[in-house]
């Protein structure tokens, strides 16, 4: 992906859906991570909106499809976002740790809840 314009054309209609299916979320992340630094820097506001869209979808749906086999994708994305934020001196308006939640943490949290009979 060379530009945010190319990104928005590929993922038309933009903005992204509130809840993306898991494969779409991963594809969007992969595309975002290929954007040139200069493109992100020059289009910071749009980039931040895209990141917020990904975070919203991940929090609503993506974390429930997380497995030990795919959690690395989100760890890598969180690290990339952290690096980009430092490089560009930018706060993306999200909690990057959303992408650092592990499969085991989700399982532990939900095991606390028992079905009501």
Image (tube, rainbow, N blue to C red):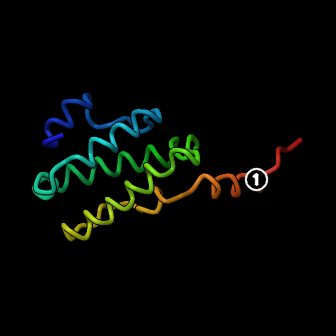
Q: Percent x, y for residue 112?
A: 77, 56
Q: Which residue is mark 1?
A: 111
Return the x and y of residue 113 as percentages of the image width and height: 77, 52
Q: Quadrant of residue 9?
A: top left
Residue 51 position in % (x across, y down): 32, 51
- The residue at the point 13 percent across, 59 percent down is 41
Q: Is residue 113 left or right of residue 42?
A: right
Name the residue at the front extreme.
69
Describe the element under mark 1 as helix, strand or loop: helix
96 sits left or right of 39 in the view: right
Q: Residue furthest right?
A: 117
Question: Does 95 sit left or right of 60 as displayed?
Answer: left
In the figure, 101 relative to 56: above or below? below
User: Relative to 90, is 11 above or below?
Assistant: above
Please rate how many residues cluster around mark 1, counting C-alpha atoms within 10 Å: few if below 14, some from 14 to 19, many from 20.
Answer: few
Pick the residue in front: 107 or 68.
Answer: 68
Q: Which one is nearer the viewer's eye here, 114 or 85?
A: 85
Q: Quadrant of the N terminus?
A: top left
- Which residue sits at x=44%, y=57%? 75
Q: Quadrant of residue 104?
A: bottom right
Instruction: Please determine whether, in this image, residue 15 is positioned above or below residue 95.
Output: above
């Amino acid at each position: 992906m060379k530009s945010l314009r190319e990104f928005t054309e590929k993922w038309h209609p933009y903005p992204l859906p509130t809840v993306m299916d898991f494969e779409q979320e991963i594809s969007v992340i992969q595309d975002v991570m290929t954007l040139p630094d200069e493109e992100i820097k020059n289009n910071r506001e749009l980039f931040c909106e895209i990141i917020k869209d990904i975070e919203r979808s991940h929090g609503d749906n993506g974390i429930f499809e997380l497995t030990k086999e795919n959690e690395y994708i989100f760890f890598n994305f969180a690290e990339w976002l952290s690096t980009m934020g430092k490089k560009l001196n930018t706060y993306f308006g999200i909690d990057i740790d959303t992408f650092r939640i592990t499969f085991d943490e989700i399982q532990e949290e939900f095991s606390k809840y028992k079905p009501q009979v």
